[in-house]
Amino acid sequence: MSAVHSTSLSLVRRSFSERHPAIRRFMRHRLATLGLVVIGVMTLLSFVGPYLTQFNSTDTDIRNRLVAPFAGVHILGTDPLGRDILARLMYAGRISLSVGFAATLLSMVIGVLVGLVAGFYRGAIGTVLMRFVDSMLCFPTIFLLLAVAALIEPSVISIVVLIAAASWMEVARVVEGQVRSLRSRDFAVAAESLGASDVRIMFRELLPNAVGPIVVAATLNIANAILAESYISFLGFGIHPPTPSWGNMLENAQSYLTNAPWLAIVPGVAITLTVTSFNFIGDGLRDALDTKLDR
């Protein structure tokens, strides 16, 4: 009976892998699979965890200030105001991940539209658009972020818009290169000869065939957006307390590095794990969406 069950399970797995080769290629990438698990756990903890803990991210307990991790009921210790580090870490993760996903979505919309138009029309329109992209890329991202952040009222929405405005250019270059390459393919020429409109060719013919590099760029952009939020908040120009983010948790910890190092270690580890995991996922998606690697 067990042999029959094992054979059936093997046939199901083989059938699934034949129908979904991209998933099979992704699952071969062990670091990407591990990264996906880590991101799943981090997302679950960030969005569900705060409802399961007995402590609130803003509750203060002056009598239990700077309690070390695993020294009491506070699993990851407390901060200088006696607030539970685990509760703040999970709520901060909700903010940081939301900023990363939202900023990436907005930057992808801008970058894809600019890249599509530039790659499709080429000529003067494409040249002007790509030279604008090049001029934007000349500015170091971190200095551009800090310069603009100093002039606006910090909030989650403004930080999302700011990060998106500073990160769409790489996406535009990726999309422009893909569309320029696909523009001369037979399917695109055939659609144009049949009288399809420019909008239809761009969004129904070219964009779906460029989705692979776009997905990879989006994954890496999430990691960059989370890092950017951390930079800005750490330097005091981003999300301000009492709303926690991983970046401003690091900012508040810098005065206690000698006597309470866990204040910096905990959010630092969270940022490192999340960013590294997204980079691993991006590598896995790149391999999964490359049909040349299918054997």
Image (tube, rainbow, N blue to C red):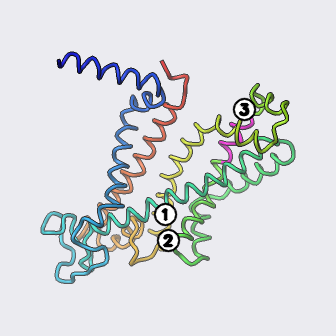
Q: Residue at x 40, y 77 (%)?
A: 241
The residue indicated by pointer 1 is: 229
- Of the image marks 2 and 1, the number of the one nearer the N terminus: 1
Whether residue 105 is in magenta: the answer is: no
What span is in magenta?
A: 172-181
Q: CA distance from mark 2 to mark 3?
A: 40 Å
Tell which of 245 and 143 is nearer to you: 245
Image position of 11 (left or right of 196): left
Q: Secondary structure at mark 1?
A: helix
Is 149 situated left or right of 64 in this image? right
Vertical arrangement, residue 215 with respect to residue 137, above or below: above
| Amino acid at the residue labelled 2 | Gly
Q: Which residue is mark 3?
A: 182
Q: Residue at x 23, y 78 (%)?
A: 82
The residue that label 2 is drawn on is: 238
> Where 93 falls versus 123 (above or below)?
below
| Amino acid type of the residue that numbered disc 3 sits on in the rendered structure | Leu
